[in-house]
Amino acid sequence: MEGFTPVPALIGGLMIGAAAALLLWLNGRIAGVSGIAWGLIARPREDSGWRLAFLGGLVLGALLYRLASGDAVMPNIEASWAAVLLGGILVGFGTQLSGGCTSGHGVCGIARLSPRSAAATLTFMASAMITVFVARHVFGA
Amino acid sequence: MERVLAALGAGVLFGLGLCVSGMVNPAKVLAFLDIAGAWDPSLIVVMGGALLVALPAYRLAMGRARPLFAERFAWPTASVIDGRLIAGAALFGIGWGLVGFCPGPAIASFAFGLPKSFLFAAAMAGGAAFARLTLANHRERVAASA
């Protein structure tokens, strides 16, 4: 548990929850990133303003953090180019098939007390943990 | 216009939260998923913190007729737990475990200008489009055989 950062994790989590609450109370929308992004790709001419604003906001928020923290934290992508390509395809395919990702099922769906979202969350958590176990401890990557 | 601004505000807050919590960093997410390694439980605290706000916020909204800036709440209609849900979630989990990115952090990470972020997002869009095509073909076949 050497990397455990409970305080920033809690503060960041509260911010994510507040963002989901805002989008629901103001716009009546679920803060599910895969669904918001897919709507933009599939129906670019229809209702795309708020989707673009939300996704742009994600990047802007990260940019503000980067400026404020003076590049204290950089994302570290250890995966190879091939793994990034395959991983991206699986994440895109899987979230469309199951209708949600970590934000839509994991935060908003569970907040709605949806058994469907709870089942999806348990499944992708378990499958991701198995994948990391196999990659790191079976193949020793 | 107010809907666009509200979405922008929510997006900025979400993006900041992903950075403050460290979830924009795939290495930190993988450290959570690696239960047999030097386990970092931070992600579960992030989800807990998010639910601490989202649970009561959703409960409150469910008792109301409409949101402030729209005609109605766009509540999800699907409730069935079927093979498609479980298979999709399982495939998503494999991709998440391979890289440490899920859709939110992958898009937020554009701010750091890492080429692998953009490849991941492009691959995600391709995978999503392929899923939609597959589902549409499947529906056609089902309709034709009915």
Image (cartoon, rainbow, N blue to C red):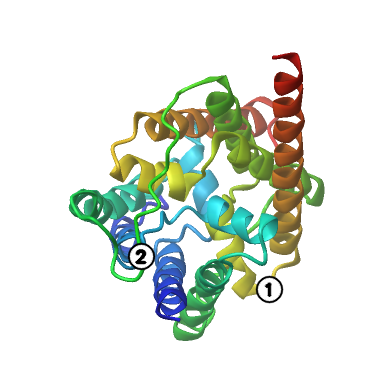
Viewport quadrant of the C terminus of chain B: top right
* Furthest residue in direction top, as rendered: B145
How far apart are labels 1 and 2 at the CA level?
24 Å
Residue at the spot 34% in from the left edge and 35% down from the top edge: A114
Relative to A139, A133 lies left or right: left
Q: Is B1 in front, or is A101?
A: B1
- Amino acid on which disc 1 is placed: Gly
Q: Is residue B97 visible?
A: no
Q: Which element carries disc 1, helix, strand or loop? A: loop
Q: Is residue B137 left or right of residue B10?
A: right
Question: In the picture, residue A98 is in which quadrant?
Answer: top right
Q: Mark 2 — residue?
A: A19
Out of A135 and B71, give the one closest to the viewer.
B71
* Residue depicted at x 45% and y 84%: A68
- Subunit ID for the residue under disc 2: A
Picture coordinates of residue B129 (x, y %)?
74, 46
Assign the N terminus of chain B to one quadrant of the image: bottom left
Q: Residues within 10 Å of mark 1 (few under 14, many from 20)?
A: few
Q: Position of residue A65 (x, y in %)?
A: 46, 78
Residue B106 in view, yes or no: yes
Kindly check if marks 1 and 2 are in contact, taking CB atoms under 8 A apart as contact.
no
Q: Position of residue A81 (x, y in %)?
A: 80, 52
Residue A61 on image: x %, y %: 47, 75
